[in-house]
Image: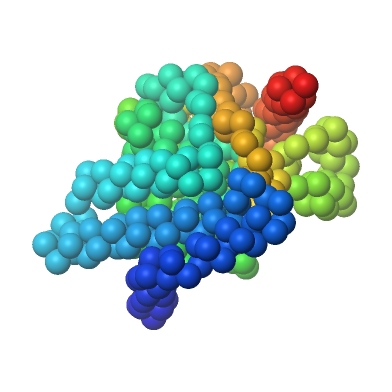
Amino acid sequence: MKRRLISMTGLILGAVILTVAIPMWLPLVLVIDACRWKWRFPLARLLSFAVCWAWLETVGVVCSAFYWLTGQSKNLPKHYALQRWWADRLLRSLKATCGFSVEVENIDALKPGPVLMFARHASLADSLVSAYVVTTLAQMNPRYVLKRELLADPCLDVVGQRLPNHFLDRNATDSTPELLALETLVTDIDASTVGIIFPEGTRANDKKRKRAIEKIALNDSARADRLQEMKHLLPPRPAGAAAMLRGSPSANVVFAWHVGFEGLDTFGGILRAISSRMAPIRFHLRRVDRTSIPGNSITDTDELTKWLDSEWMHMDREVDEALKARHEMGRNHRG
């Protein structure tokens, strides 16, 4: 309750102050951008998105409060509709203010459900894009595994906890309850539902990748060797994926990767990206039939880890090829 009181009060005050102060901050950041020779005005764009985000979050909180007051706090269809509206409007706002756009490939891979989506994690925004893809484009209902720290976001704190998601405690000393919760999360998923997890556990970068492989090598040199050539992703953490596979033994698996978010894991990286015209984010889905997963992978940790590592290396190669093509296209465009 204390967290929500602080976050919601801060949200509403922030939305009002940002809006009222537009005549003051907008000319100032336009001058700052111009003095830095940033003619796409990235600071102005980012603050404009902040205004949109604050009001969209406020609308989400107000709607969720209305549902509570009218005895509909457990009405899942209404909350899924609110989530769909929120993700769609946030992405539209990103496009209008910062120039982000998304091209989705192979959307049919999500249907029919039930499916489990194992997704790449490279940015603060890729979970939003996955929500847009699942809820708006595929018209399906997601069940997310997210880190508990995201409960600082008021909409995720309220609506996200009313919907069947799990906010993972990454600092838990005993992982057994957390893994059991992941199993339970997807036990009853149906043809309209997608269970979503980001097996890397955190946003990828070169330092994290090197550190993760070094840590693996201390206990499993063979696994470290087969992941050594990884260039873009982080080694997957198999425990969470295994728990979801156990929880939904008939679900197929969809691997999701994207390019275009590279370098957007920091505030400075975001500013650099929107300082120039951005190519569309490419979001790719690839379905793997459940029968292709090794028969004993659900109970055999080693088999599952080898399978997941193989698929993750496959994804890493796909990302590498896509980035090379993107770089070549950009070079030709500049030429």
Residue in front for this viewpoint, 159 or 167: 159
For the point 74% across and 26% down, which residue is it? Answer: 334
What colouring method underlies this structural image?
Answer: rainbow
Q: Looking at the figure, which quarter contains the C terminus?
A: top right
Q: Looking at the figure, which quarter contains the N terminus?
A: bottom left
Q: Position of residue 289 (x, y in %)?
A: 52, 19
**Image quadrant where residue 277 sits:** top right
Q: Position of residue 95 (x, y in %)?
A: 47, 40
Up-down: is 57 above or below 270?
A: below
Total labels drawn: 0
Residue in front for this viewpoint, 220 or 280: 280
**Image quadrant where residue 304 sits:** top right
Residue in front for this viewpoint, 290 or 22: 22
Q: Is residue 158 visible?
A: yes
Q: Is residue 212 visible?
A: no
Q: Residue furthest left?
A: 70
Q: Position of residue 15 (x, y in %)?
A: 38, 67
Up-down: is 53 above or below 204?
A: below
Q: Position of residue 125 (x, y in %)?
A: 54, 47
Q: Say left or right for 321 vs 18.
A: right
For the point 22% across and 44% down, which residue is it? Answer: 77
Q: Say left or right for 281 vs 214.
A: left
For the point 75% across and 37% down, which residue is it? Answer: 232
